Image (spheres, grey):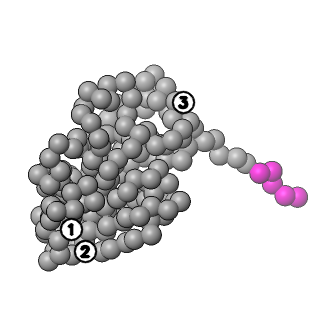
Amino acid sequence: MSEPAVDLHRWTRAEYEQMAASGLFEPGRRVELIDGFIFDMTPQSSFHATAVHLAAAVLQASLPGVYLRIQSPLALGADSLPEPDVAAVPGSPRDYLESHPAAALLVVEVADSSLPHDRQRKLPLYAGAGIPETWILTRNALEVYRQPEGAEYRSVRVLRRGDTVATLANPDGLIAVADLLP
């Protein structure tokens, strides 16, 4: 006798936001909605926190006039509300008083224990949303993903401490990869 198929419930962004607003998630619990599924986010290590702040400082210097959101939601479609570690978005904070940004120029994820999640779930989401550039910072490298097509990036580069990189938003602003890595 075969077992009946069991479907997973996929949540919409509106349902997820309603759950959060009603206090369904415990205070301090870090979760995010990706493709209709709610994922617990891993606690931040010292490495993670340091890398987030380094990336934000370096990018703020390289992207004057661009608003950087730190560990804040992006409204990517009807069923995703990821919280990238750093997102360079158009406009200013007051532009998002009523709703989270639905686009970004650049997204940065710091991956320590979350590397499989970032590569397998978040990268396809960012590519599918048309985000032109996603960076993943690991302990020893910067992975640069560009040219989104469907749910993947066509261009992937891995850079090390001696390398430099420029954002697509400021191609003349060279950044030393060593300045991004703790």
| Circle number at residue 165 | 1
Q: Position of residue 16 (x, y in %)?
A: 50, 33
Sequence-first disc among 1 and 3? 3
Please report the residue visible at 22 percent of the width from the left and 41 percent of the height from the top. Answer: 67
Q: Position of residue 31 (x, y in %)?
A: 41, 42
Give the crowd class for mark 2: few <14, some 14-19, many >=20 residues within 10 Å: some
Please report the residue visible at 32 percent of the width from the left and 50 percent of the height from the top. Answer: 105
Examine the residues drawn in magenta and state their main secondary structure: loop
- The residue nearer to you, when weighing 83 against 4, is 83
> Does residue 145 appear left or right of residue 172 in this picture?
right
74 w.r.t. 116: above or below = above
Q: Nearer the viewer, mark 2 or mark 3?
A: 2
Q: Nearer the viewer, mark 1 or mark 3?
A: 1
Residue marked by disc 2: 159
Q: Nearer the viewer, mark 2 or mark 1?
A: 1
Can residue 32 be seen here? The reply is no
Q: Is residue 150 magenta?
A: no
| Circle number at residue 15 | 3
Give the crowd class for mark 3: few <14, some 14-19, many >=20 residues within 10 Å: some
Q: Position of residue 127 (x, y in %)?
A: 45, 57
- The residue nearer to you, when weighing 109 against 135, is 135
Distance from Cα at disc 1 to Cα at disc 3: 39 Å
The amino acid type found where label 3 is placed reads: Glu
Tag 1 secondary structure: strand
> Does residue 33 appear left or right of residue 7 in this picture?
left
Can residue 59 be seen here? The reply is yes
